[in-house]
Image (cartoon, grey):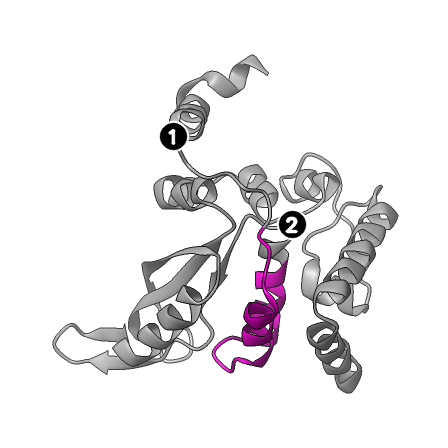
Amino acid sequence: MFRTHHSRGRKRFLALNRGKFKKNATLKLTAKQLKLIEETQLISLGEKIELLLVSMGNKLTTEIYSSVKYNFDKQKKREIATETSLEKLSLFFKQLPFQFFLDQKEMINKKSGKKQTWMWFQVSVNEAAQHFMKDFGEDLTEYEEGVLYGFPLSAIRAFGGLIDQSNQLTSTPAHYFLAGVGSKDFSKKEEQYYADLWERLRKISPRIIRWAENSISSET
């Protein structure tokens, strides 16, 4: 473990351990806040699940962006997010207990082929995770990303190329909404991990999970 205290690892280690940030592992959503998440039209079904995962501490952070609208700015020669869509999302998050900040990245819109200043809300469970994403979000390793986003350890190792990846695909709602790259030798344990997590989500919001399951069944 001595290697983690050198160069990049040491900078991250000191920033988090010396910083006086709130480091709560979970967030308790009130009935009003949960209802707000369930009924809002500002975020997608998948993003609603993401917020639940952050509240329960499975994910430390996530990105919300589906309702951000863009207009092409002729002077800047790029697509710019509308202030109205950003303000609506900002007001939405101010009613919730999450830490959040607005982030952006210059890219090419694959649909339009035009330059775009892509913007999203980075939403985190606590201040430490928020500062980590602000300071190191553009320099994450695949292993840091896997931990931050709550994937099983074996899946993180497979994604990073340390062990064989799995070619097996499952069609369960839990796998569809929660899983990423899996491992060959631990695929059954990973499937159980996602199944258990799905049931924990169901206890928080039966409505959202029912919608998610119905959305999958309607596609098959």
Which residues are the magenta region? 27-52
Vertical order, 141 against 38 (above or below):
above
User: Which SS type dominates the magenta stretch?
Assistant: helix
Residue in the image at 33% along x and 73% along y: 86
**Residue wearing tag 2:** 58
| Quadrant housing residue 173 | bottom right
Tell me, yes or no, if residue 93 can be seen here.
Answer: yes
- Give the residue type at disc 1: Gly
Tell me, yes or no, if residue 82 can be seen here.
Answer: no
**Residue wearing tag 1:** 19
Earlier-in-chain disc, 1 versus 2 = 1
| Quadrant housing residue 202 | bottom right
Could you say whether the residue bearing mark 2 is in a helix, strand or loop?
Answer: loop
Residue sitting farthest toward the left: 75
Q: Looking at the image, is mark 1 or mark 2 nearer the viewer?
A: 1
Q: Residues within 10 Å of mark 1 (few under 14, many from 20)?
A: few
Q: On the rendered structure, is 34 left or right of 13?
A: right
Could you say whether the residue bearing mark 1 is in a helix, strand or loop?
Answer: loop
Q: On the rendered structure, is 140 left or right of 30?
A: left
Residue sitting farthest toward the bottom: 218
| Quadrant housing residue 159 | top right
Determine if the magenta segment contains residue 49.
Answer: yes
Q: Locate residue 201, reporting x and y percent.
A: 73, 62
Residue in the image at 38% along x and 30% along y: 19
Q: Locate residue 131, reporting x and y percent.
A: 39, 42
Q: Residues within 10 Å of mark 2 (few under 14, many from 20)?
A: some
Q: Are discs 1 and 2 less than 8 Å apart at CB? A: no
How many badges with numbers are in the image? 2
- Give the residue type at disc 2: Asn
